[in-house]
Image (tube, rainbow, N blue to C red):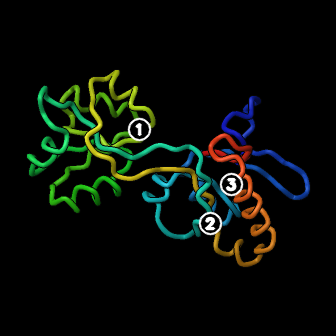
Amino acid sequence: LPPADLGDGRLLVEAGEGLRYLLARPGDVVTYVREGAADLGVAGKDVLEENPGGYYELLDLGIGRCRLSVAGILPPGTDPEGFLAARRSLRVATKHPLAARAYFAARGLDATIIPLGGALELAPQVGLADVIVDLVQTGQTLRANGLTELAEIMPVTARLIANPVSLRFKAAEIGRLVAGLRAAAAVGGEAGAVPLGR
């Protein structure tokens, strides 16, 4: 995948030497890889959790660091853990239904999942949901909307995935790419020159 903004509206770039780069939504990246239209792809761990199977996860690129968290409107003087522990059931607005359902089920809470495509922060404010499950990086958007991060479900970074057939028949090429990315990530870390993003 190329950087997030190609600047000229192209979604498919011919890079020479038989290489093509495709820019797609993170959820669609998994589909392109799973169906064999792309040999490799980059998507966040949250996206992979929502789209399991049909690909191999090769490498944690260590970029795009954030976390999948539960957030809601916390009444004054209420402890975040106490807020969740006091509930038997919750209405949860999210773009991550599988992760949300699994998280609340593991804690013995009955969660009614309300799928939303965006503007999750509004759901608790208008009474649509008790809490949201969404990606959080700094927490600034939550705070701006009167929400508090109540619990972290999982850390999220960008991952390199491969189509199983491609991995079998293009093992040498993919192996070289993975080794190069691994070396770049080790040298540069978050500020490194890894030319892939989600």
At label 2, which amino acid type do we have?
Answer: Leu
Question: Mark 2 = which residue?
Answer: 58
Residue 37 sits above or below residue 167 on the image: above
Q: Which of the image's four quarters has the C terminus?
A: top right
Mark 2 touching mark 3, by CB under 8 A? no
At label 3, which amino acid type do we have?
Answer: Ala
- The residues tagged by marks 2 and 3 sit, at their Cα atoms, a distance apart of 15 Å
Residue 105 drawn at (x, y percent) = 21, 60
Residue 3 quadrant: top right
Element type at mark 2: strand
Crowding at dot 2, Cα within 10 Å, few <14 / some 14-19 / many 20+, comes out as some
Mark 1 touching mark 3, by CB under 8 A? no
Q: Kindly identify the residue that appears in the image at 74 percent across and 44 percent down.
A: 193
Q: Kindly identify the residue that appears in the image at 33 percent across and 47 percent down.
A: 152
Q: Nearer the viewer, residue 5 or 11?
A: 5
Question: Mark 1 = which residue?
Answer: 136
**Looking at the image, is mark 1 or mark 3 nearer the viewer?**
3
Question: Mark 3 = which residue?
Answer: 186
Q: Nearer the viewer, residue 43 or 126?
A: 43
Q: Nearer the viewer, residue 45 or 61?
A: 61
Mark 1 touching mark 2, by CB under 8 A? no
Choose the circle earlier in sequence order: 2 or 3. 2
Residue reaching furthest top? 144
Residue 8 quadrant: top right
Q: Which mark is residue 92?
A: none
